[in-house]
Amino acid sequence: MAGLQYVISGLDMLKDYPEIKEYIKNFNGSGGFMYTTEEDPQYNAEIEKQMSKILDAHGVHSGSSWGFMLRGIQSVLNGTTTRESIEEELFKFEKRYNEFLREQQQLQDERAAFREETDPTDKHL
């Protein structure tokens, strides 16, 4: 779900960069965002540099996470999906994840109680 968080963060970071948003919105390279060689004479190499600087300032993206984030941003910019639907998915995931953590803690507590009942001298666990 980190990928969806990158989409939301990317949308926030691009608010002041309409030219980059427009580039992402209209991008249709056959090699995807990561591997397309631009042949369009109107292509602005500066936009690509700015995208990297703004959206991947710390160099955390692999090719797949970069492409996923940009396609997610593109999807919102083109109206295929909405920011709200992505935020809702993130909320649902966080809720399920927190439930999972509670269940895991409950299992650990039950195991510890069982060990205490069966061998109260076992201090290793």
Image (cartoon, rainbow, N blue to C red):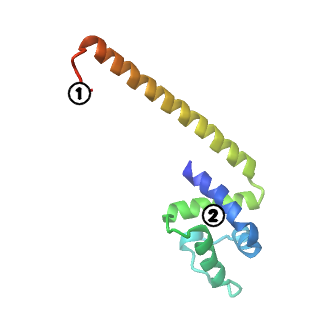
Answer above or below: position of 2 versus 13. Answer: above
| Residue 112 in the image, given as x and y percentages of width and height | 34, 21
- Which residue is drawn at the image coordinates 26% and 12% (left, top)? 118
Answer above or below: position of 99 versus 1. Answer: above
Local crowd at mark 1 within 10 Å, few (<14), some, or many (≥20)? few
Kind of residue indicated by mark 1: His
Which corner quadrant of the image does residue 121 belong to? top left
Residue at the top extreme of this rendering: 117
Please tell me whether mark 1 sits on a helix, a strand or a loop.
loop
- Which residue is drawn at the image coordinates 63% and 63% (left, top)? 70
Which corner quadrant of the image does residue 31 belong to? bottom right
Front residue of 32 and 118: 118
- Does residue 89 appear to the left or right of 77 in the view shown? left
Please tell me whether mark 2 sits on a helix, a strand or a loop.
helix
Answer above or below: position of 44 versus 86. Answer: below
Residue under label 2: 70
- Which residue is drawn at the image coordinates 73% and 67% (left, top)? 25
- Does residue 123 appear to the left or right of 1 in the view shown? left
Residue under label 1: 124
Kind of residue indicated by mark 2: Leu
Residue 31 seen in the current view = no
Nearest to the eye among marks 2 and 1: give it.
Answer: 1
**Earlier-in-chain disc, 2 versus 1:** 2
| Residue 61 in the image, given as x and y percentages of width and height | 51, 64
Determine contact: label 2, label 1, CB under 8 Å.
no
